Amino acid sequence: MREDFDLLAFLLGLPLGLVITLSIGYFVWKRGKRQRRYDERYKRIQEQARSLSWAVTIFTLVIAWAIIIIIEGASLSFFLISGVYVLAMITYGIGAAIADKKN
């Protein structure tokens, strides 16, 4: 598999893809500012969507964790799911602390 991997194409394509993504994002953001898409109502909707997304993600992780522990026991996948769950909870706590400080 290593023989088929083109390192030069990867090293050129990765920054190029990043530049293209950032430039498209910039123009979308600029157009949104002109159309007043980012007002208080928009921000509140996005906050609620992120909150719902976090809840669904955590629920999905807990269900996947339970299925893995029942089917496979304490294996690598169990520890990976546990690590992702712990990381999600840490970042949620940091985000909550930052939001609490701002308000």
Image (spheres, rainbow, N blue to C red):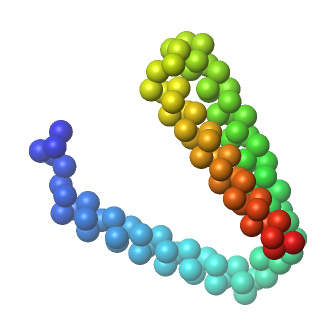
- In this orientation, does residue 62 appear? yes
Residue found 83% across the figure and 78% down from its top: 39
Q: Quadrant of the C terminus?
A: bottom right
Residue found 26% across the figure and 68% down from its top: 12
Q: Is residue 97 above or below residue 53?
A: below
> How many discs appear?
0
- Quarter of the figure with residue 34: bottom right
x%, y% of residue 101? 81, 70
x%, y% of residue 78? 53, 26
Residue pushed farthest top?
71
Q: Nearer the viewer, residue 58 or 10?
A: 58
Q: Quadrant of the N terminus?
A: top left
Q: Is residue 102 left or right of residue 1?
A: right
Q: Is residue 35 above or below residue 54?
A: below
- In this orientation, does residue 46 appear? no
Residue pushed farthest left?
3
Q: Nearer the viewer, residue 24 or 3?
A: 3
Q: Nearer the viewer, residue 35 or 66?
A: 66
x%, y% of residue 96? 77, 59
Q: Is residue 56 above or below residue 23?
A: above
x%, y% of residue 20? 43, 73
Q: Is residue 35 left or right of residue 63?
A: right
Residue found 76% across the figure and 43% down from its top: 55
Q: Nearer the viewer, residue 35 or 40?
A: 40
